[in-house]
């Protein structure tokens, strides 16, 4: 028996899962996902929490690699909402991003998913799109840089206020 978690909130007598509603097999990852979802302005009026279930279903996860003492996530262990700038993913994850859509940027130091994630305001006060960004740091290892302006690999600017 093992535990799984998912981020939920209650609404009109129902418990509703956020995002894709998948069960997360790791508590630390689930806590990071909860923290990320709580920061989204459209959930500001909801009380989010981790729903827990026990299951006997087999868990088919590939083991993570390691780089500089940190895990290198693969497609079976990756939860984007749990990722923080500086975390690592393997080349299979980078290939998935590259093959999802034509990239917004494709250089060794900047691989960006072709669809904007959100908008942020730059230092000049201009609203600009941000993109999920990776940079290659070693063979089969990419660093998650966050959600950066096109062609950049450092997350900057400020979020646009949600009204």
Image (cartoon, rainbow, N blue to C red):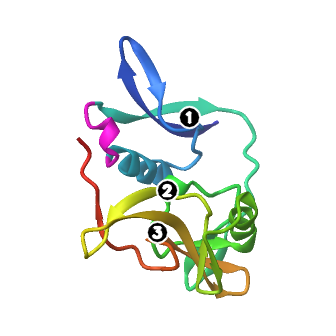
Question: Mark 3, residues whose alpha carbon is within 10 Å: few (<14), some, or many (≥20)?
Answer: many
Where does residue 89 sit, x and y in percent of width and height?
63, 70
Of the two numbered discs 1 and 2 in the rendering, the one whose residue sits closer to the viewer: 2
Going from N to C along the chain, the mark reached first, 3 or 2, is 2
Q: Which of the labelled discs sits on residue 21, or is there none?
A: 1
For image coordinates 52% across by 79% down, the residue present is 151
Secondary element type, mark 2: loop
Label 1 or label 2, whichever comes before in sequence order: 1
Q: Which quadrant would residue 122 be assigned to in this image?
A: bottom left
Residue extending farthest to the top is 13
Instruction: Tell me the residue that label 3 is attached to.
Output: 146
| Badge 3 element | strand
Closest to the observer, 55 or 17: 17
The numbered mark at residue 117 is 2
> Which callout, 3 or 1, points at the residue further toward the start of the chain?
1
Numbered disc in front, either 3 or 2: 2
Q: Distance between the residues labelled 3 and 2?
A: 10 Å
Dot 1 falls on a residue whose secondary structure is loop
The answer to which image quadrant residue 102 occupies is bottom right
Identity of the residue drawn at 25% across and 75% down:
124
The location of residue 19, given as percent across then percent down, is: 51, 38
Magenta residues span 39-45
* Displayed quadrant of residue 8: top left
- In the image: residue 100, left or right of residue 4: right
In the image, 18: left or right of 137? left
Judge left or right: residue 156 versus residue 153. Answer: left
The x and y percentages for residue 29 are 50, 54
Q: Along the line of sight, which residue is nearer the eye, 65 or 95?
A: 95
Identity of the residue drawn at 37% across and 35% down? 49
């Amino acid at each position: 028996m093992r535990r799984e978690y998912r981020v939920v909130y209650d609404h009109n007598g129902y418990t509703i899962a956020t995002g894709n509603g998948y069960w997360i097999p790791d508590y630390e990852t689930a806590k990071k996902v909860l923290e990320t979802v709580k920061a989204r302005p459209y959930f500001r009026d909801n009380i989010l929490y981790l729903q827990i279930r026990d299951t006997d279903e087999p868990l088919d996860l590939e083991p993570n690699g390691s780089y500089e003492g940190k895990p290198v996530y693969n497609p079976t262990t990756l939860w984007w909402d749990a990722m923080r700038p500086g975390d690592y993913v393997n080349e299979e994850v980078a290939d998935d991003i590259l093959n999802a859509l034509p990239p917004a940027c494709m250089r060794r130091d900047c691989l960006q998913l072709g669809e904007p994630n959100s908008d942020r305001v730059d230092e000049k006060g201009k609203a600009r799109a941000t993109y999920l960004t990776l940079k290659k740091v070693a063979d089969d290892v990419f660093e998650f840089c966050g959600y950066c302006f096109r062609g950049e690999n450092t997350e900057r600017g400020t979020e646009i206020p949600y009204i």
